[in-house]
Image (tube, rainbow, N blue to C red):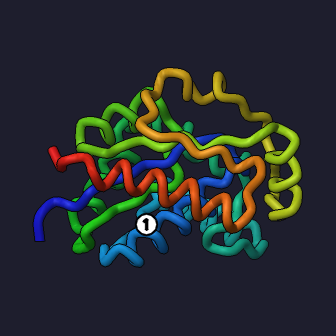
């Protein structure tokens, strides 16, 4: 198998990145593609699990304690700025699927340029702040920290596609994903 097609989703916490990634995965599989979703932050969740275990508290493998995740990311980036991107791209290189989707790009300064150089296309996922706040409270994050596009430098990322999840009905998600996939799959692989 040749090099997979690659999509990276970015947006604020609660914007709907994982939901859009699941819709993209389904849409691609319906078109005959094999798909793997690979999280850039997988090492952060692993370390978060160790922190919680050390503190004698349970946390699920993909539950969010945003304060812990950000702190660990800050420490790792201070020690080795390229670690998360290096680890992620190593896992991408091991993928045996025709498509790789990343649903948690957060860093515009180091990770974004590395993913761009590796041939990823970028999808900006957004919604209103009101909807995002409702989602964050509904999913039960252990901590919620203030976020903005400026906080993360998202205004420096060149989006190839965008999805607005404010009115995320199943039909709306399907239509936006279908349109995005039709355009993206028509693009030649570099």
* Left or right: 83 as drawn, with respect to 50: left
Nearer-the-camera pick, 186 or 6? 186
Nearer-the-camera pick, 7 or 49? 7
Q: Does residue 71 appear anywhere in the picture?
A: no
* Left or right: 156 as drawn, with respect to 117: right
How crowded pointer 1 is (Cα within 10 Å; few <14, some 14-19, many 20+) is rated as many
Please identify the quarter of the rendering in which residue 46 is found. Answer: bottom right
Q: Residue at x 58, y 59 (%)?
A: 175
Residue 92 at what x, y percent from top left? Answer: 28, 60
Residue 4 at what x, y percent from top left? Answer: 22, 61
Please identify the quarter of the rendering in which residue 2 is found. Answer: bottom left
Q: Does residue 23 appear anywhere in the picture?
A: yes
Nearer-the-camera pick, 36 or 121? 121
* Left or right: 167 as drawn, with respect to 37: right
**Disc 1 on helix, strand or loop?**
strand
Q: Residue at x 55, y 28 (%)?
A: 154
Quadrant of the frame with the C terminus? top left
Residue 47 at what x, y percent from top left? Answer: 56, 61
Looking at the image, the residue that sits furthest to the left is 2
Residue 48 at what x, y percent from top left? Answer: 62, 61
Quadrant of the frame with the N terminus? bottom left
- Circle count: 1
Q: Residue at x 35, y 43 (%)?
A: 121
Q: Residue at x 56, y 37 (%)?
A: 74
* Left or right: 7 as drawn, with respect to 123: left
Q: Which residue is mark 1?
A: 37
When the figure is inspected, residue 106 is found, relative to residue 176, above or below; the finding is above
């Amino acid at each position: 198998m040749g090099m997979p097609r690659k999509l990276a989703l970015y947006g604020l916490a609660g914007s709907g990145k994982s939901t859009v990634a699941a819709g993209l995965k389904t849409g691609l599989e319906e078109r005959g593609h094999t798909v793997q979703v690979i999280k850039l932050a997988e090492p952060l969740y692993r370390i978060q699990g160790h922190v919680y275990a050390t503190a004698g508290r349970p946390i699920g493998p993909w539950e969010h304690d945003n304060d812990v995740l950000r702190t660990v990311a800050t420490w790792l980036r201070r020690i080795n700025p390229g670690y998360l991107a290096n680890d992620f791209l190593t896992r991408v290189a091991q993928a045996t699927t025709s498509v790789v989707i990343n649903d948690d790009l957060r860093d515009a300064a180091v990770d974004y340029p590395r993913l761009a150089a590796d041939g990823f296309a970028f999808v900006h996922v957004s919604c209103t702040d009101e909807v995002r706040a409702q989602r964050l409270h509904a999913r039960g994050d252990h901590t919620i920290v203030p976020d903005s596009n400026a906080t993360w430098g998202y205004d420096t990322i060149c989006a190839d596609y965008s999805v607005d999840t404010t009115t995320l009905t199943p039909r709306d998600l399907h239509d936006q994903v279908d349109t995005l996939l039709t355009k993206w799959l028509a693009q030649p692989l570099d």
